[in-house]
Image (cartoon, rainbow, N blue to C red):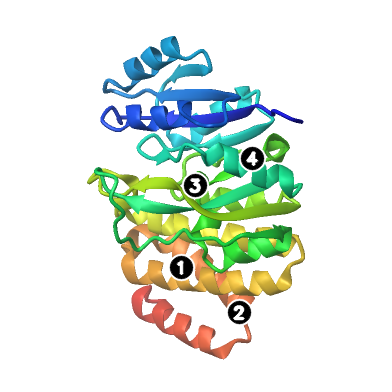
Amino acid sequence: MDNPLISVIVPVYNVEKYLPKCIDSIINQTYKNLEIILVDDGSPDNSPKICDEYAQKDNRIKVIHKKNGGRADARNVAIDVAEGDYIGFVDSDDYIADNFYELLLKAVLDNNADISICSSKCVDEEDKEVESIFHFDVKDEVLDKKEALGKLVQGNLSFVTLVTKLYHKKLFNNVRYPLGVHHEDEYFAHHIIGEADRVACISDEIYYYLVTRNDSFMHEVNPDKTIDSLYAAFDRYKCVKSLKYDDLANIQLNQVYGKLILCIKQLDLKKYKKEIKKYVNIVFKLYFPKKEAFKILGIYFKKVLKV
């Protein structure tokens, strides 16, 4: 496979200010054998027109216009029609370095890997690097499945996020994005890595997150996201447990425990009482006989839920 086709999927919604820079960064890649799929997710602004105009300029670009269904649905629609040997994703308000796909493809092929992953940085609208609570650094190394899942379980966001990676298309034979949830990357990451045998990592910071938009999803505070984060953490626990990585499952169980405590502290428990009680019971069962967890959760359960 000397010149494999890469399908680049870009979900588009209400990003007319940022979209041209994103698309330009893709069409200007040093690696040219690309299929660029722009998915207009029912965007109400000028984004659909921008997509169509770019498609007229570059025959590698395909545009899908669909009713709004969210980013996960847009990505799934594109995955279903992608013709590439490899699949990559770019968020429509971000952009990538000119050699992004050249380097990620080289890492995959040189190391006989199923996924490659790079470092990234957060930038403002003037392309200046900004301080962020998010850290996406990786080092040059090749990991097996368990090692990669270990990075994920230990909280390395580069292994959580979708867009800093290149994937062999075969990994999507049994995996799609979950619909109707927040934190979809947190649900998706462990399943797609669980399909891979080897993950090649490069330290180059070649993906650029725009983090200064007031309406960016990274700035939203939403109780439903808090509870979904708990669900995703437990889903990851079940995933690594099913692979018989018991040591990683125990680490992930601590993440579930922490997410549950956060939910108990932050959420309106009249609204989420049923969900909280369910996961308190789960954590009780899985943590027992860890007395400290039982004691702390017991206090919250009695004090806040009044049972």
For residue 38, above or below residue 181: above
Q: Position of residue 40 (x, y in %)?
A: 41, 23
Which callout, 4 or 3, points at the residue further toward the start of the chain? Answer: 4
Marks 1 and 3, how far apart at CA: 16 Å
Q: Secondary structure under badge 4?
A: helix
Of circles 4 and 3, the one toward us is: 4
Of circles 1 and 2, the one toward us is: 1
What residue does disc 3 label? 184
Marks 4 and 3, how far apart at CA: 25 Å
Q: Position of residue 225 (x, y in %)?
A: 39, 53
Which callout, 4 or 2, points at the residue further toward the start of the chain? Answer: 4
Marks 4 and 2, how far apart at CA: 42 Å
For residue 68, above or below residue 298: above
What residue does disc 2 label? 287
Label 1 crowd bin: few (<14), some (14–19), many (20+), radius 10 Å: many
Would residue 240 appear left or right of 32 to someone viewing this image? right
Residue type highlighted by circle 2? Tyr
Q: Secondary structure under badge 1?
A: helix
Marks 1 and 2, how far apart at CA: 14 Å
Q: Are marks 1 and 3 in contact (CB under 8 Å)?
A: no
What residue does disc 4 label? 105
Which callout, 1 or 2, points at the residue further toward the start of the chain? Answer: 1
Q: Nearer the viewer, residue 60 or 194?
A: 60
Residue 259 - label? 1
Which callout, 1 or 3, points at the residue further toward the start of the chain? Answer: 3
- Point 66% across, 69% down: residue: 249
